[in-house]
Amino acid sequence: MIKQFTKYIEAQVARLTVGTNLFAGEGDDTTRPDRCVWILESVPGIQNYYVPALSIKPIQILVRDTAYQSARDTARELFDLFYGKYATEVSLPATTSGEDSYVAISTTGSEPFSLGRDAEARFKFSVNITLHLELQ
């Protein structure tokens, strides 16, 4: 699902390209460019026992940039892409790995917030999104 979420962001934000400045999951932070976004599944999701087709998936979006305002603006753009999509279907593209396709039926999240600077003095922001998903 995290790959589908990342591909959806790539399709919506022209300046982000998977594998170049947009990444899914953990990885070697030292090899990523100064200006990048990566998507994490930091917290386990919740599967609906009574309706297995429904689940809740918390996602963390990390944004890093050498300029504070640029990092902040990118984080806000990504937040706005998802927040408040209650009862609005957001189709996530299929991947070649054979994962199930999902449709987000609503999203909630926290406002983007600064994580300060990393060891290389780059600015980092976090956006936390909770997807309420239905199997397609």
Image: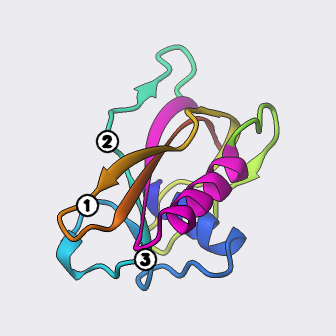
- Give the percent coordinates (x, y) of residue 9: 61, 65
Q: Is residue 118 left or right of residue 47?
A: left
Quick one: 112 or 25, which is closer to the camera? 112
Dot 3, how many residues are within 10 Å of its Cα: few (below 14), some (14-19), or many (20+)?
Answer: some
Distance in Å between CA atoms under marks 1 and 3? 16 Å
**Disc 2 secondary structure class:** loop
Residue 71 falls left or right of residue 11: left
Span of residues in magenta: 53-82
Using the image as rendered, state which of residue 92 and residue 27 is in the foreground. 27
> Which of the marked residues, 1 or 3, is nearer the chain's N terminus?
1
Q: Which of 117 and 88 lies nearest the eye of the viewer?
A: 117
- Above or below: residue 112 compared with residue 123: above
Name the secondary structure under disc 3.
loop
In primary-sequence order, the first of circles 2 and 3 is 3
Query: In this figure, which residue is indicated by the disc labeled 1?
Result: 26
Left or right of 18, for residue 41: left
Q: Residue at x 46, y 65 (%)?
A: 98
Mark pair 1, 2: CA separation: 9 Å
Tell me the tag on residue 105.
none
- Which x, y percent locates residue 107? 66, 35
Q: Which residue is mark 3?
A: 35
The numbered disc on residue 42 is 2
Q: What type is the residue that disc 2 sits on?
A: Ser
Taking the magenta stretch, the answer to whether it contains residue 81 is yes
Other residues around mark 1 within 10 Å, as few (<14) / some (14–19) / many (≥20): few
Residues tagged 2 and 3 counted as in contact (Cβ below 8 A) = no
